[in-house]
Image (spheres, helix red, strand yellow):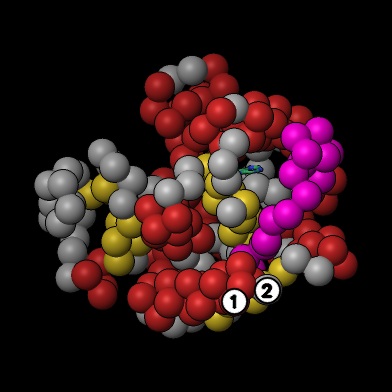
Amino acid sequence: MRLIIFGPPGVGKGTQAKLLSEERSIPHISTGDMLRSAAAGGTSLGKKAKAIMDAGQLVPDDVMIGIVREVLASPRAAAGFVLDGFPRTSDQARALAGIFRDLGITSYWVLNLEVDDEEIIRRLGARLVCRKEGRIFNSETDGLTLTSQCPECGGELIQRDDDKPDTVRKRLQVYHAQTEPVIGFYRAAGVVVDVDGTNSIDVVRREIRVLLNDLQAR
Ligand code: AMP
């Protein structure tokens, strides 16, 4: 199964993509995670990417397209994937169509998670991430703080630098201006599955499961 998980920052793309990856045994390919790991590794790409991410801006298309082309062409993505965080611009969407063509990929779905801006600002303000494994928690619903340990692995919980309020506002502006229009490209191709992202993680997860099972049964 080949999936693109689409939606604004904070809608739960990463969380649902991880769950899908575990349930369906397909790799979770997150461009944001790849950039954060490059940043943590202190590579020259990582340093440049970190400055862009912390400003709530987008890393240049040519860099992102090169990264995604390489990972999708690798053996780990051969039997399917859940792509999270890409495409984010119309140029990226056009390039992805070319990558799919080159790799002979003709069937894929776009899960479009929707939630309004106010809820996003609330969620990102409360988001905590395990430094070790990248698991995502919500300080309000999970009863955790920055001094808590990760309930899964005991690791340190951190707030992403780009989850600070000013950066979140900028990311939302960038999303509405550059990323949201990309969904029109996929609607025209008839591959979009809309999912209400306002519900709890578990309800969204079950809805996605039902929708995907229906698609596979067709
Ligand atoms: P995410 O974890 O998907 O929210 O991504 C975090 C940040 O990484 C974004 O705010 C961007 O700065 C950068 N980023 C991730 N994916 C892309 C992409 N496809 N194009 C440009 N920038 C990206």
Q: Which residue is mark 1?
A: 214
Where does the image place residue 203, in percent across and percent down from the top left?
40, 80
| Of 123 and 21, the residue lying toward us | 21
Q: Nearer the viewer, mark 2 or mark 1?
A: 2
Mark 2 and mark 1 residues within 8 Å of each other at the beta carbon: yes
**Magenta range:** 96-115
Residue 181 x, y percent position in the rendering: 79, 63
Label 1 SS: helix
Q: Is residue 2 visible?
A: yes
Q: Amino acid at mark 2?
A: Arg
Q: Residue at x 40, y 22 (%)?
A: 41
Residue at 67% across, 62% down: 110
List the residue tagged with mark 2: 218
> Looking at the image, which residue is at 29% across and 42% down?
133
Quick check: 174 left or right of 36?
right
Q: Position of residue 2 (x, y in %)?
A: 62, 52
Q: Secondary structure at mark 2?
A: loop
* Residue 112 sits inside the magenta stretch: yes
Disc 2 crowd rating (10 Å Cα; few below 14, some 14-19, many 20+) is few
- Give the alpha-carbon distance from disc 2 to disc 1, as whole Å: 6 Å
Quadrant in the picture for the N terminus: bottom right
201 above or below 182? below
Neighbourhood count class around disc 1 (C-alpha, 10 Å): few under 14, some 14–19, many 20 upward: few
